[in-house]
Amino acid sequence: MEDSKFNKAYMYPNPTSPNAPIVFNPEKCDGCNKCIDFCRADCLHPNPEPGKPPIMLYPDECWFGGCCVGACPIPGANRMDYPMNQRISWKRKDTGELMRMGMRNPPPPNTKPPCV
Ligand code: SF4
Ligand code: SF4
């Protein structure tokens, strides 16, 4: 069984989902894979090519919490790409502040982003 084809596993992105929850900037991302370590849903996997951005293998299992973006040490190397139904913002009537789901620095009273 050692050289059998059954000893190999092939993975490829789930083709059924139209979403790309995380967008990587290959110009900035150095493939450190820190974002993968922070993904609790194991959506992301290392790129077989060292130094290249991770691969979003299971986009339909993403929680859109943004831990992967928050964990990235390089600004702009990755970003969330929320689906249309999550691109909703709220405006506080008295102050005019705008807030949205998953924002990095939400105003009081809930000042912590979901994954911190
Ligand atoms: S947003 Fe959360 S669940 Fe989605 S890829 Fe990033 S860390 Fe994983
Ligand atoms: S997006 Fe950021 S954390 Fe993820 S591999 Fe690239 S540089 Fe590292």
Image (tube, rainbow, N blue to C red):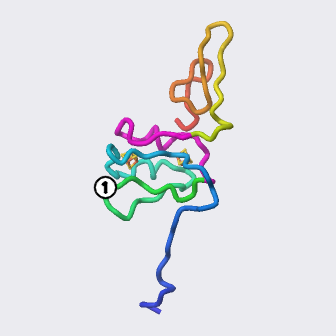
Is 76 situated left or right of 8 in this image? left
Q: Residue 51, percent across and down?
A: 31, 55
Callout 1: few (<14), some (14-19), or many (20+) C-alpha neighbours within 10 Å? some
Where residue 75 sits, quadrant-wise, is: top left
Is 96 situated left or right of 37 in this image? right
Is 49 situated left or right of 85 in this image? left
Count every numbered label the image shows and give the total.
Answer: 1
Viewer-closest of 22 and 6: 22
Q: Residue at x 65, y 36 (%)?
A: 86
Q: Residue at x 39, y 44 (%)?
A: 25
- In the image, residue 15 lies in the stretch drawn in magenta: no
Q: Residue at x 55, y 50 (%)?
A: 40
Residue 4 position (above or below residue 51): below
Tell me the SS state at disc 1. Answer: loop
Q: Residue 11, percent across and down?
A: 51, 69
Q: Residue 34, percent across and down?
A: 40, 49
Q: Residue furthest top?
A: 94
Q: Which residue is mark 1?
A: 51
User: Which residue type carries mark 1?
Assistant: Gly
Is 116 situated left or right of 93 in this image? left
Q: Please report the bounds of the magenta region as a residue range.
A: 60-81
Q: Residue 8, percent across and down?
A: 47, 80
- In the image, residue 75 lies in the stretch drawn in magenta: yes
Viewer-closest of 42 and 10: 10
Q: Residue furthest bottom?
A: 1
Q: Residue at x 45, y 51 (%)?
A: 37
